[in-house]
Image (tube, helix red, strand yellow):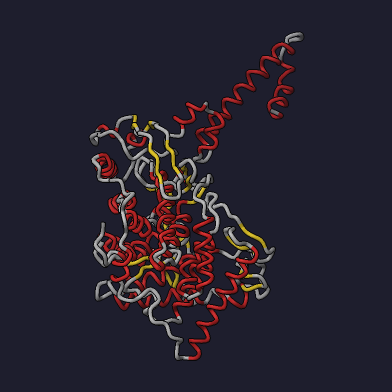
Amino acid sequence: MQINIMFLRKISGIFPAGFGIRLSQKFVFLLFLSGFITLCFGTLFLLPDTSKFRRIFLSSTQSQNGERLHNYASKKMNKKSVEDQKSLLRNTNQEKWRSKDKFDVDVKPLGFLASNYETQKDVSLNREHIVAANAKNKESEISGAHKNHANFVFDYKAFKKSLKYPPLGNQPEPKDSEIREKRNKIKEMMKFAWDSYRRYAWGENELRPVTKDGHFGSLFGGLKGATIVDALDTLFIMDLEEEFEDAGKWVENSLDLNVNGEASLFEVNIRYIGGLLSAYYLSGKEVFREKAIGLGKKLLPAFSTPTGIPRGIINLGNGLNWSWGWASAGSSILAEFGTLHLEFLKLSELSGDSVFIEKVNTIRRILKNMEKPHGLYPNYFSPVSGSWVQHHVSLGGLGDSFYEYLIKSWLMSAKKDNEAKGMYYEAVEAIEAHLIRRSAGGLTYIAEWKGGVLDHKMGHLTCFAAGMLALGANDAPDTKKDHYMELAADIANTCHESYALDTYCRIENGFSGIKDVYTTNPNHDNVQQSFFMSETLKYLYLLFSDDDLLSLEDWVFNTEAHPLPINNLKSI
């Protein structure tokens, strides 16, 4: 209002004497009212896609109607034809999810406007693919395809028998003294990191080793113990029995799923659900299975979009969901909605409920049928219109694990998922043709692509591509097998030139990230990331272990390095 008052002062001289006070009061009121209305509408329609702002300015009834695209549309919809589903209103019924943890997700009846996106003519995806896919899912749900799964029992003994090697293999000490020394050193690093977390941050999400306290973080929606859940399988395979038992007891007694906070769909899936699934498959402890399924159900409201592509953020308490404020035009991010397939397949396997795999199969169908610029997958996708938002392609943080999950879906299916295989090798050909380059110094790197222009930079998250290419080389066409393996080695060499670990990241009370890798006197960021124990130390330990310890004939690792079994059993 300071600007408005100053403006009035400047123009007050143009009115006749005796008229100024009465008119200025009315003018102030009208100007204030118009400014307030402008602010309201600007907030509602121009600010980032979040329900928080909408709740400020709308009544409770209007707020519910205005948040249609953030709320969960219940699975049990009335039967409708494909044409009916294009109508303005979609009706939903109330539904509760229950688990043995005795938590509920209580979703109120609502309807939401769903046809705005239908009028858009510039969508590259054939709309019928999306509508038909969603209609098929909803009709199967109505017809009783989703039965009561309360009595479903996963046969863990049959699963263990299906493994070619026991989860821990036969693990005598390596005969080579140098390898034995390195393996023991990595185990000591794990013990040191765990003990430091246990001492200073037990139950919190991550340790802050410089200040000797816990780091709650903002990615997990009120969930705690991210380090505990993330480290479960690493403790198990390193045969740290006491530490594993302590972690398991914490999960059973203290991992509360009744939280009410804003969570990253992606992070909760890869860290919590991935960690719990892996711990169950390795140990057979029922608590891990139950917690994983219960948490998986809490993520389902994020998929309640016109296309079925989930949004990136979800409130784990009430199911409200929205896109990241920084994501262009309310987009969903390729690396997030494209990194759910492995975990959701296993949730269906362990629960007997196909709802999880149906969600990710919808994502797969949409992406497969999308028109892709030069065969590349852009990072930003609208969950409302069903179209790419920007032609920005990267194998870094916004795109990386989508490609990883294509080849791993093929492997997890016991090499039966030919759709995933085809999509992967087509993507790799496009990446090599348009993104892979060699620097003047002879280092191979993967550039980014922005609307047809190459940006010659490579982030450290892109280093995963070396392992991905090596993993996919064996099943590539004969003329490409050796080539892809050489390409993987070249990229790995580029990444090797960029890293140091125990020397610079280890401090008195744990391991910390460093802010500048080019200095020998690093400034630490004061966070011992949960993935340090889940990924970094696990992979290092496996490098110096026999191949039958988590054999690749039995296991596929999710993007957080949680081992999930290949489907050697009959699928659900």
Left or right of 373? Residue 55 is right
Please state the horizontal and vertical placement of residue 169, each as a whole percent of the image.
38, 78
Along the viewing direction, whichever of 22 and 64 lies nearer the viewer: 64
Quadrant that contains the N terminus: top right
Q: Can you see residue 488?
A: no
Along the viewing direction, whichever of 291 and 302 lies nearer the viewer: 291
Q: Relative to 385, is 420 above or below?
A: below
Q: Which residue is rendered at x = 28% and y = 71% of the image? A: 476
Quadrant that contains the C terminus: bottom left
Please state the horizontal and vertical placement of residue 38, each as a whole percent of the image.
57, 27
Please state the horizontal and vertical placement of residue 79, each as a whole percent of the image.
25, 34
Q: Relative to 378, is 551 above or below?
A: below
Left or right of 216? Residue 300 is left
Please state the horizontal and vertical placement of residue 292, each as a whole percent of the image.
42, 56
Q: Which residue is rendered at x = 26% and y = 65% of the image? A: 569
Along the viewing direction, whichever of 365 and 203 lies nearer the viewer: 203
Q: Which residue is rendered at x = 49% and y = 67% of the image? A: 534
Left or right of 26? Residue 322 is left
